Amino acid sequence: MSALAKGAGVASGRPAGGTGPRSTSRITPRKRAQRGAFFVLMTLFVLVSMFPFYWIVITSLKTQNEINQGTTSLLPGHITWSNYVTDFTKEDFIRPLLNSAVVALSTTVLTVVIASLAGYALARTQMRGKTLVLGFILAANFFPIIAMVGPLFIAYRRLGLLNSYPALMISCLIYTLPLATWLLTSYFSQIPRSLEEAALVDGSGRLRTLRKVIMPVALPGVFTAAILSFMLTWNDFTFALSFMSTPDKFTAPLAIVNLGQSQYQTFYNLIDAAVVIISIPIALIVIFAQRRIVTGLTAGSFR
Amino acid sequence: MTVRETAASPGSRTARAGGPPGGGYGRSLLAQDRRFGYALIAPVLIVLLAITAYPLVYNVWNSFHHDNLLIPFEKGFSGLANYTELFTNNQFVPALVHTVGFTVVSVAFETAIGLALAVALNKRFRGRGIVRAAIFIPWAVPTVVSAELWRSMFDPQQGFVNYLLSSLHLPLAHTTWLDGTWTAWVAILIADAWRNTPFIAIVLLAGLQAIPGDIYEAARIDGATAWRTFRKITLPLLKPALMVALIFRTLQSFLVFDVVYIMTGGGPGTATNVLAYLDWKAFLVATDFGYGGAVSVALVAFALIIAGIYTRVFRIEQPA
């Protein structure tokens, strides 16, 4: 966490464009009106972003009786934690959470390893065809996910991988690898060569140098790649829906869709409790690593 | 990092001679360095080829064959049958129309709001960090969250939208949103925009921050109005970022799946059926891999066309 906080602090010190004319000291009525309008607009944006979360939180705290009565107030009435208890016990929502964590974490590790190797090759060796490789990786990023589903389904069926973690991990690499490879290539290119040369003169092998010298220096980049990979995999729905068939293998997003449904009714209090639960890790990541995510998303896009 | 130095031990000498190009080091060292590069790049290429190129080739192959798991006795070459089916089965063309309409409306709407957001967030004000986080969180949460959240908000009895409309004495307060064609589209669009507008804002904000401040200073000294500055300076310099945001969002919108699956299931009837949903159902409900392959090939073709259009448009406008 400390690395994160430090990174965020450094980034926040950067001047943001040249717009805010802060230095003008006189405040005219016109300026005041502009500021007022700006404030109202910002409030509106924040409200639209945040209110739905407030809504699902209070819905998740409602009893079944309150739900059945329909919406009568914007305030929570009779706060109950029973929906969370039900999700965790009767609905067995812990299992899908664990599945999601396993898949997201292992995909993240896999991504960081593969993308670091590739990033090092692209940034530091004289290999031919770098432009071609980077172009292909970029194109892969735009490949229609849904077009992969059918052929991969058949392949996994033949390999006996349907309804297994590896099927999901391999598929999810399409979300993470292109982004991570681009990101790490650009991070590795920025590291001064002298650093690595010193280590090589000492006689360490190149892979060892990558691990012991380059990776620590590029840690912010590696961290960004890891965070983004985790988020993108945690958020997957399409692949889980397509390849996981038994509830004990469902990931959290897939489990939510199958939760709280009966033939006659939708139990929004149960659904929304689960929705709150899977949003929490992501919200925490955004709060603590916001700037890292932003730089990661935009790195390599335009330079 | 389980890969040991075995492969790299000869490479170490290469690098000792110096990584930078143009050094006068031997040909064999260069060859070693290259081999080392190929070895490191291999995993990413193998994985990405396996999960994109292989499915693409397989889809093309399948699209010319009968391959339905439910009809195992009918196999073999089918000619263009799967492709003609696209235009004769009353599903593909309406889904295409829905998809294009959804893409145009959602991308236009999200870009307009995203641009406004980016410009606003580029200003300095107290609490900007918190405001930014608040606005970016919807983008970061799973699509399942945005879809379920808005499904719950749009529920006629237990939701928020109708409650708000009726408290304000506005019309439509008794709408069953997801049961009507247009109202279902409105719900899907709102859920999609809520989650994806922040993405456009993030990318455009990064673009704005890359614009050096002294340009604005110069414009201010020259007495340019805010609008003129925006049109003549900000927009042209924002073009690369805008292109990135637009390509990403257009392709994502064109392939919209999760939200439709969760909120409407393509319904009511087939009113919100989109290409990605059609393709998914062909594969995993009908298990018709021939027809699904044809739809997939069409999707890849459309994605190429979209990317092509954007690169052309932005390249032509560049000198102006």
Image (tube, coloured by chain):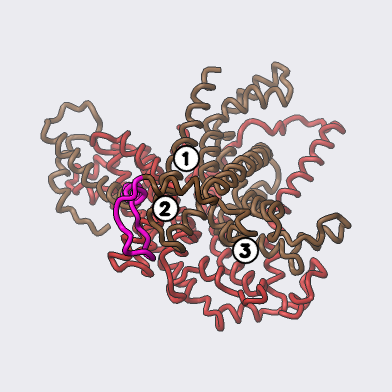
Left or right: B127 with respect to A244? right
Q: What color does chain B have in the rendering?
A: brown
Residues B184 and A122: in front is B184
Q: Badge 2 sits on which subunit?
A: B
Q: Which residue is mark 1?
A: B302
In this rendering, which labeled residue sits more in front, label 2 or label 1? 2
Residue B230: x, y in percent?
67, 27
Q: Quadrant of the C terminus of chain B?
A: top right
Q: Residue furthest bottom?
A: A90
Q: Which chain is red?
A: A
- Per the image, the residue denoted by label 3 is B148
Q: Which residue is mark 2?
A: B291
Q: Does the magenta run of residues contain B55?
A: yes
Camera-nearest label, 3 or 1: 1
Amino acid type at mark 1? Phe
Magenta highlight range: B53-79
> How many neighbours does mark 3 have within 10 angstroms: few (below 14), some (14-19), or many (20 or more)?
many
- For image coordinates 61% across by 24% down, the residue present is B214
Please tell me whether residue A141 belongs to the stretch shown in magenta.
no
- What secondary structure is marked by label 3? helix
Residue B122 in sight in this render: no
